[in-house]
């Protein structure tokens, strides 16, 4: 690969990761994952650029890490599978990674199992006791889903000593955007959280939640 090509790949990678990180900061996890994945085709070129130009031994693969860290919160198994396939098809990524990507993948698979159990509980109970029915390990999921507008915290007389319950409003109808064709869909938040079929282009994918 020529120096100019490496530079191009590096720049494309950096641009996609920058957008992904901004979306992550705004709790727009679907978009963060989608932009992070746009950087994947440039990982090899970016690695070469950093190694040859700056003599960097190890590289931080933020574009992979964002996907591994975000996907469990969206119950997004598809993206985890894609990340696993990427790591399997490109052995260099493991070799040059500054972090243990295999361990991160294992953690993500563990996390998504917790997330599925927790979401099932939240959905079936509607009102979940803050303490008791939720394990401490579920706090970060609950916090994230609250930031995403999927859960709400309300005071309740019947909620025991903590005086708090978590109430899902996941059945609220909300506008969502198809990731393939941009078609606007009105659907329940819970439906937008897992992949479903776009009525316009027929693509079976996760939709972007546009409003809380
Ligand atoms: Zn569509």
Image (tube, helix red, strand yellow):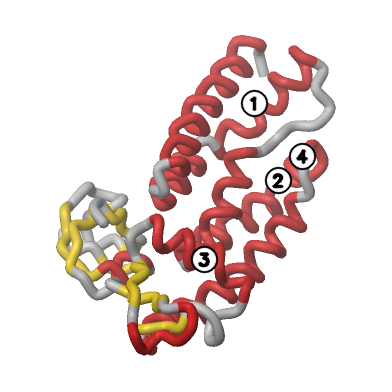
User: Separation of disc 1 and disc 2 at Cα?
Assistant: 14 Å
Q: Is the Cβ of the residue at disc 4 closer than 8 Å to that at disc 2?
A: no
**Quadrant in which the N terminus is drawn:** top right
Q: Nearer the viewer, mark 1 or mark 3?
A: 3
The picture places residue 47, in percent across and down from the top left corner, at: 70, 28
Alpha carbon separation for disc pair 4 and 1: 12 Å
146 on left or right of 181: right
Q: Nearer the viewer, residue 106 or 111?
A: 111
Q: Is residue 19 above or below residue 131?
A: above
- Label whose residue precedes the other's in the sequence (1 or 2): 1
Quadrant hosting residue 186: bottom left
Determine whether label 4 and label 1 are within 8 Å by CB: no
| In the depicted structure, whether residue 31 falls above or below residue 171 | above
**Circle number at residue 38:** none
Local secondary structure at mark 2:
loop
> Where residue 60 sits: x, y (%)?
70, 35
Please report contact status of discs 3 and 4: CB closer than 8 Å, yes or no: no
Sequence order check: which comes first, mark 4 or mark 2?
2
Which of disc 3 and disc 1 is earlier in sequence?
Answer: 1
Quote the CA–CA distance across marks 1 and 3. Answer: 32 Å
Instruction: Respond yes or no on whether mark 3 lies under 8 Å from ligand 1.
Output: no
Q: Residue at horizontal 61%, vertical 45%?
A: 64
Residue under the image location 63 percent in, 50 percent down: 86
């Amino acid at each position: 690969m020529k120096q100019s090509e490496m530079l191009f790949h590096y720049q494309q990678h950096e641009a996609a990761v920058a957008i992904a990180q901004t979306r992550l900061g705004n709790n727009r996890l679907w978009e963060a994952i989608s932009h992070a994945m746009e950087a994947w085709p440039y990982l090899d070129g970016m690695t070469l650029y950093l190694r040859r130009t700056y003599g960097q031994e190890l590289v931080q693969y933020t574009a992979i890490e964002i996907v591994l860290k975000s996907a469990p919160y969206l119950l997004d198994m598809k993206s985890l599978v894609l990340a696993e396939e990427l790591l399997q098809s490109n052995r260099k990524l493991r070799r040059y990674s500054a972090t243990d990507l295999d361990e991160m993948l294992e953690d993500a698979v563990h996390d998504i199992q917790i997330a599925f159990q927790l979401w099932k509980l939240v959905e079936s109970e509607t009102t979940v006791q803050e303490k008791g029915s939720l394990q401490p390990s579920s706090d970060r999921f609950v916090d994230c889903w609250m930031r995403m507008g999927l859960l709400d915290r309300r005071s309740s007389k019947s909620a025991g000593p903590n005086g708090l319950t978590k109430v899902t409003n996941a059945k609220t109808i909300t506008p969502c955007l198809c990731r393939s064709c941009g078609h606007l869909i009105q659907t329940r938040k819970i439906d937008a959280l897992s992949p479903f079929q776009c009525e316009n282009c027929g693509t079976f994918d996760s939709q972007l939640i546009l409003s809380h």
